[in-house]
Image: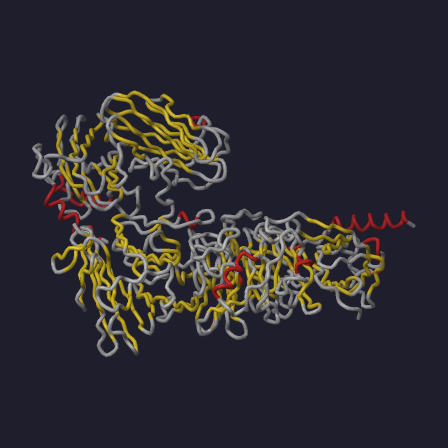
Amino acid sequence: MKALQTATALLILSINLTAQPKEADYYPIMDIPLPEGENIEVSGIDVLPDNRIAISSRRGDIWIADGAYSATSDNPPTWSLFARGLHEVLGIAWKDGWLYLTQRPEVSRIKDSDGDGRADIFETLGDGWGINGDYHEYAFGTRHDKEGNIWVVLCLTGSGGADDKSPFRGWCMRVTPDGQTVPTAYGIRSPGGIGFNHHGDVFYCDNQGLWNGSSSLKHLAKGSFQGNPTGNKYFALTDVLGPKPPEPKSGSRIETERKTVPDLVPPPIVLPHGKMGNSPAGIECDETAGKFGPFTNQLFVSEQTHSKVHRVFLEKVNGYYQGAAFPFLKGFGSGNIVARFSGNGTMFTGGTNRGWGSHGKKPFSLQRVNWTGKVPFEIHEMRSRHNGFELTFTHPADPKTLTDPTKYHMEAYTYIYQRGYGSPVVDKTSPKVTKAIAGTDGKSVRLVVEGLVKGHVHELHTPVIRRKDTEDPILHPVAYYTLNEIPAKD
Amino acid sequence: MNRRIIKLATALLAVFTLNAQKPPKGFEKVDQEVVISTLRAQMKYDIRSFSVKPGAKVKLIFKNVDDLPHNLIICTPGKSKGKDKGQEVIDAVMKLGDKGVEMDWEPKGHPRMLHSSGMVQPKKESVIWFKAPKKEGDYPYICTFPGHFQLMNGMMAVSKLANPVTNLTYKLYHGSWNKCPDFSKLDPKKTGNLANGLFDISPRDKNDNFGFVFNGDIDCPKDGKYTFTTASDDGSLLFIDGKKVVDNDGIHGVQSRSGTVNLKAGKHSIEVRFFEKSGGEELAVAWSGPGFKTQALSRSKPGGGSSGATGIPIEPNEGEATIYRNFIAGAGPRAIGVGYDEDVNLAFDANNLRLALIWQGDFMDGARHWKGRGQGYQPPAGDSVIKFPEGIAFATLKSEEEAWPKAEYRTKDLRFKGYRLDKRQHPTFNYEREGVTIEDTPTPFPGEELSQLKRTLKLSGKKTPNNLYFRVATGDIAEKNGGFLIDEELQITVSGSEALNIGGELRVPVKFKNGTAQLELTYAWAE
């Protein structure tokens, strides 16, 4: 029997060698040529009316492209320079004829009022925070939320400082339509990007470093503490979020400190450092209603160092967001900073590798990803259950390859929560899948797991699962689920 | 831009183009003497580049040892920096046609022509006495005898860092080394001239795995002992007359090494070799000798810190202004730099809503913020920088004599509202102070030699204070020509109110009428 199994496995392997599915079969990456002779380190992308897109650059330019949707290396779009000389724009949003920009020192809005194609009105909307000449003092901004606010996350001064001349470093601020800058959340270290999910809740990515054992995707609930207490000194400047809260103990675990630091919201998605990437950046939700494939309402996270885009599934358990991260697409031209979906299902991506190197060797790039219409065989969702997990797939799976619990490999681990830089992987355990029950539709499996650890990343490998019709393996047979909360028995 | 150069050129031509051997008035003592010879049968000048300080009095002796007649005409800087060879002047010579011979191939009155030696016959010489332009830049010199200029040209750099290094050239190499390789066996990726005589690694095209060899001549003022120093990251070597004087080789952070050599008065060859593997990159060179202390031969002095990163000059389009919002030294972290095509520039401080800096010449260099991670403040790229007082520019005072209020790094009762650009991309800044809206429009306009700035401030509000003051400048203030001379370098005039000198502060009371007030100021550099 065992020999037969091995033979079958070998057979599957040999079949697949001839036509191993690859990412580009489903999501090819196309270059969009940028204007020649210009240095455009793409740091923001938004979609404009009439199939145009606007991009911002780290050097402070705003360019508008006509024809980006169909652009290829041989078919460049028409570019026009809309504005120049802005201060490192890391957020761009089109609304009612204005382009809203998050620059290092402020949220502004700009407009071409005389119709010559160049912006002539530059209005400062909100600038209620400090900067002090440090390159680390980045400000990343969202598009507008439902109330018309722009959310801004402010990197600390230096890798871990909070200068008196730079108020609200390490905080999230909302700039309201009437120009108020409202302190909204705190505890931020070094953001790489910010974005909404389909409910309009706001998330950002924070990079491994002080008080961040690994990089992670975090939920900016109003009044929440994101883990790094360096900026807590600015409670002296505002009472919007109440009195100065208690600080976490260094050398502990987030799961432990949650109990005594009530504002601390554990990261919904830990992106294990070195495994998933090194530098998560922008967050973009697929609200294209299927035009980009089967991942409606999931989040796509740009990864700067590894030049990738990750896919993230979130669920809410006991009132907290948490979920799984999956590899999605690699091989982008430069270090991915932002992604933006257009209504027709095009994902525009942009990046830079200045200051922080990337696997993609171009100094900067603008690209697009269009779904070919073929659905890859992937883990679609991974949900937690009181005694394990449930996986769903994008195609029916061969039930024979789903039901053997020994063919699932799981590891659980966490990171030290500490003042020092980063952390090794610690508290490693090996939860055991004891039962794997295939769903009746063939598109799901229920895993009963012995040894779930609350607060740990649960890394799951599914090497033997095969698609029912083609016998293809899962394109990315790995998932990283951050189990901050375990749901009650259903 | 062009208009200003025409004016400048005409003024200088009229006053200083004199070919007399006897010094004209004011040139009995000169700041610098330069000797340029033709090379026999080579169609070249022996000095291909030299540098002079802005405004320096120069005696240039032009010796023609060749068997053909030659001249030497100094031109204004061209649009393509460093590469221009006075093409328009040559074009004008071509147009002279038959008249060329009788006019000595000199297109008299051409706007780009600054000084001429006149046609110098074989074995003769000529002297040009001139005052170097105030504006820094590369000024080409050429022989306009038909067919000569392609080879017979050179570059006079006007630079505050003028130094005795001439004919300086560079060769750029690519490669990964742990010490200076034998560059002579490698092919350079790029070569070029450094007319300003400054050893400079900014012509590089990448920040890791590159090397440079610089060659030039250095003019020793007298016999004696000279000390040369390099500070580099990574390694460097310095040779005088082919002999190694400084060994600062190997991989290291910025490290200084010196060497001493006895030299005779006159020219000696100088060579610096440099390589960078990875991480930071820096090269500074200096020398000292009999009768003078350490003088930099690069933009920064070894151990003296950098005066600012270079390599990505930011320039306005023709006829327009360009904006640079960034960390600007002297204008704060919320600085808004404005570079006008008229070669005058300013930086506005959006933290305290004040004009922080004005300056002449080049605008800004983006290299600090646009290479690597972009740490820190970058100073202006140009010259004649005027700094205005820090803190707030508007305050309500109990009396005109009351001490000016101290300001935080950022003042809460001020609000920056942004700016509008006109068709020429010239900004009008908008800001508010306690219910008073201020529209602040600077505009460049031509002056005698240097461009000046005009500034219109329109203030309005529903409830306007009757004790609002505008602090324009501080310093040593002298009343002059209906205005005020500040520290003998800046002439300010104010209209719309009467400016007061209150203990070294130039204050303007703002008088509102029907809720509005308007002030006009001019800022002119003292000649």
> Residue A21 at what x, y percent from top left?
71, 54
User: Image quadrant of residue A436?
Assistant: bottom right
Name the foreground residue: A358 vs A155: A155
> Residue A397 at what x, y percent from top left?
79, 61
- Viewport quadrant of the C terminus of chain A: bottom right
In the drawing, does residue A384 fall left or right of residue A33?
Answer: right
Residue A117 seen in the figure: no
**B56 vs B349: above or below:** above
User: Image quadrant of residue A224?
Assistant: bottom right
How many numbered marks does the figure carry? Answer: 0
What is the basis of the colouring in this image?
Answer: secondary structure
In the drawing, does residue B362 fall left or right of residue A313?
Answer: left
Residue B287 seen in the figure: yes
> Residue B422 at what x, y percent from top left?
30, 66
In the drawing, does residue A420 fall left or right of residue A106?
Answer: right
In the drawing, does residue B223 fall left or right of residue A225?
Answer: left
Residue at position x 69%, y 60% from top?
A324
